[in-house]
Amino acid sequence: MSDSIAVNMGAGGAGLSVSDERVLQAAVHWQVRLESGAATDKDRLAFERWCAADARHQAAWRRVAGLLDSPLSVVRELGNRAPEQIHAAQHALLHTRRRNLLRGALAVAGVGSATALIADRLAPLGQVTADLRTGTGERRHFALSDGSDVELNARSAADVRFDDAARVLRLRAGALIATVARDVARPFSVQTTHGEARALGTRFLTQLRDTHTQVVVLEHQVEIATRSGQRITLQAGEGATFTTESINRMGGAVQSAAAWSGGMLAVDDAPLSEVIEDVRAYHRGFIRVSLAAAPLRVFGVFPLGDTEQILQALAHSLPLNVQRVGGWVISIDVRQA
């Protein structure tokens, strides 16, 4: 099998015993191996024996594999279409050197700005005034005054605006999962720059990205309203993305978008640029993705506790060069033939 991947449930993750963590780690290990496109018949036979050896193994595999909708068949098909993606190179030249990056920052804005640039990777400096916020690699639950619970993903921020007429969370960055307490007199909504998601039930996810907002209903119903007035109601198990002008329903295993709550990153046919955006929330450094590499499609389930291992897994399943220089900069580019 490939190099093992450590599972770290992180702050707010479920509490597991050491033995349970090892079983889950092994399940992730098998998932990466089987979906790499390089698994042999011997590997698959060994995997079947591992599953049959212990009921805990089967349960861990269902947890990991169940985050995606038929992930093995999808990735296997991808491997058949592009077998050259199986063996990716491990080294490449950086397009941006750490020394030049820091030298440029110093030349333009002085030592203070360079220090702030690095400090922002530890905790988003632009969100220090938010009512609710998390730093890099941190997930956290917040109990609200109405009895609702909000879990913030890493590098996320939100403001709380409760009054006698309404309960509003203003999502400024990142993602949250709201478990809403019942209050008939005061509706509960999460607002972003693109519009709002209004709870008609108890639990839903909202994620703010650069170009759109994503909503996934985990329980009951949510109504989405864009700033232009477009509306749609989603049921449990449904999701949608929306901009200020339009709403688009999501397909596939949409509930996997909430996998970060359990310390996992579940990806079902997403561009590499979006995946790295999620990885950056857990990585205390700079990750650069080239324009050529950004649109590559990614499938898989990865543990968020070790971003270095995520990047290694991506390098093994896609035609990528991943190179680190110093302690702060990682560059990702397409492998040259």
Image (cartoon, rainbow, N blue to C red):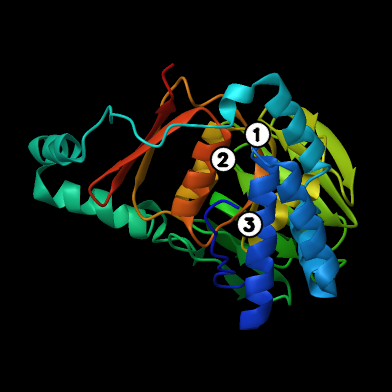
On the question of residue 162 being in view, the answer is: no
Marker disc for residue 275 = 2
**Residue type at mark 2?**
Val
Q: Are marks 2 and 1 in contact (CB under 8 Å)?
A: yes
| Quadrant of the image occupied by residue 213 | top right
State the separation of the CA atoms marked 3 and 1: 21 Å
State the separation of the CA atoms marked 2 and 3: 19 Å
User: Could you tell whether 288 is left or right of 160 in the image?
Assistant: left
User: Could you tell whether 207 is left or right of 240 in the image?
Assistant: left
User: Could you tell whether 254 is left or right of 8 in the image?
Assistant: right
Is disc 1 surrounded by few (<14), some (14 to 19) or many (20+) residues within 10 Å?
Answer: some
The numbered mark, 2 or 1, whose residue comes first in the sequence reads: 1
Q: Mark 3 falls on what kind of element?
A: helix
Q: Mark 1 falls on what kind of element?
A: strand
User: Could you tell whether 2 is left or right of 121 in the image?
Assistant: right
Query: Picture coordinates of residue 238 (x, y %)?
Result: 86, 44
The numbered mark, 3 or 1, whose residue comes first in the sequence reads: 3
Nearest the viewer among 262 and 176 is: 262
On the question of residue 25 being in view, the answer is: yes
Of the two numbered discs 2 and 3 in the rendering, the one whose residue sits closer to the viewer: 3
Marker disc for residue 29 = 3
Q: Which residue was labeled with disc 1?
A: 270
